[in-house]
Image (spheres, grey):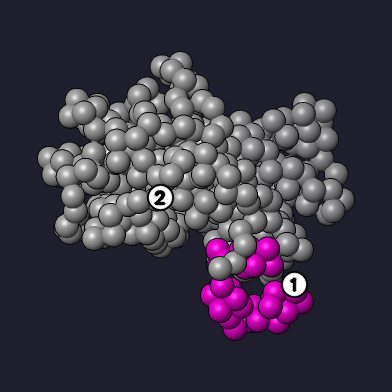
Amino acid sequence: MRKGLFALAAVGLLATGSMAACSKDKTSDNTGSGTGTSSVGKVGVILPDTASSQRWGTDDPKYLKAAFDAAGVQADIQNAQGDKSQFQTIADGMISSGVKVLMIVNLDSGTGKAVLDKAKAAGIATIDYDRLTLNGGANYYVSFDNVKVGELQGKGLIDCLTAKKYTKPVVAELNGSPTDNNATLFAQGYNSQLDPKYASGEYTKGPNQSVPDWDNAQAGTIFEQMLTQNKNIKGVLAANDGLGNAAIQVLKKNKLNGQVPVTGQDATVQGLQNILAGDQCMTVYKAIKQEADAAAALAISLAKGEKPTTATGTTTDPESKAAVPSVLLTPKSIVKDNVKDVVADGFVTKEQLCTGEYAKMCTEAGIS
């Protein structure tokens, strides 16, 4: 088993002993079927979509299922496919089926709160996974330090613009979905780095727009309009790899790819390939297995009726001002020189990344 980039002490602190002495006659699945004992409750997990990032369709369900299976805890893992009505329907089904723990990645805070309220009324423990539901009142929150994610993006873009030696570069910002609190935190982080540059006149603040639902197609349309209106854009702060790739496709069409640094997030295969090709400046790697393991350990402990202890304190809900017990993990900046670290960590494989034209680029980047 490969050694991860990050220490997993937080997971251990979450629920001491939660993985031990679990019944082995229980399996997790995507249907909620299976056997089990009454002493350990079932866990329901609702993921948001499969379009905004590859993680929701592949990585998170795989890692969560593995963690629940290893603990012998039954789990019902479903995806709302970006549909708020479906999100609520799935939640209603899980609540009526008697889950003891409900973990959600909300599509927006309004929908998320409605689901959390129903769960709490039914006596179900609740976990906000990756995104905090504003005014939602979840019992726990597990995510990365999302302000830090944004800081890494802002610093990364500054480094790339410095390397280009541009004078007073115009920077465009493609922000994440306005309904996602994480997008607000990312922007808080990268603007903390970029605003001083704008204020001093070293950089020029260009067009700045949020992308509804993290929709990559809309991002492409939005950025094309930005570039049409301002041909002098020299840098793009894109909030994730999907939005970044949408901008890169527009830049390619205008023969500007590689000349205009573009940021990203999530360390997707596509994002890493864009970095290897020189079309993307950087991405942010969030060790999703570590996040999934931390959330699963918490859910397992709750399903067993134990009182878990969180490792990193609390997060203040900006609306309710409530202090939500939290685990916040540490992200990592990825540029061409350390793309190999993501492969070494097992998050993506060489076979996935180093296909076709990228094979030579991988060799040059020290990926083996």
193 in the magenta segment? no
Task: Return the residue at label 1.
Answer: 365
Write the residue at 56% across / 32% down. 312
Write the residue at 70% across / 82% down. 360
Residue 249 is situated, as x and y percent measured from the top left of the image, at 57, 63
What is the spatial separation of the Cα atoms under label 2 and label 1, in whole angstroms? Answer: 38 Å
Residue 31 is situated, as x and y percent measured from the top left of the image, at 20, 58
Question: Residue 19 — which label?
Answer: 2
The C terminus sits in image quarter: bottom right
Look at the numbered disc 1 and give the secondary structure of its residue: loop
Position of 67 relative to 184 (above/below): below
What stretch of residues is rendered in magenta?
340-368
Write the residue at 51% across / 44% down. 12
Identify which amino acid the numbered label 1 is placed on: Ala
Q: Is residue 154 visible?
A: yes
Q: Is residue 130 visible?
A: no
Along the line of sight, which residue is nearer the eye, 199 or 191?
Answer: 191
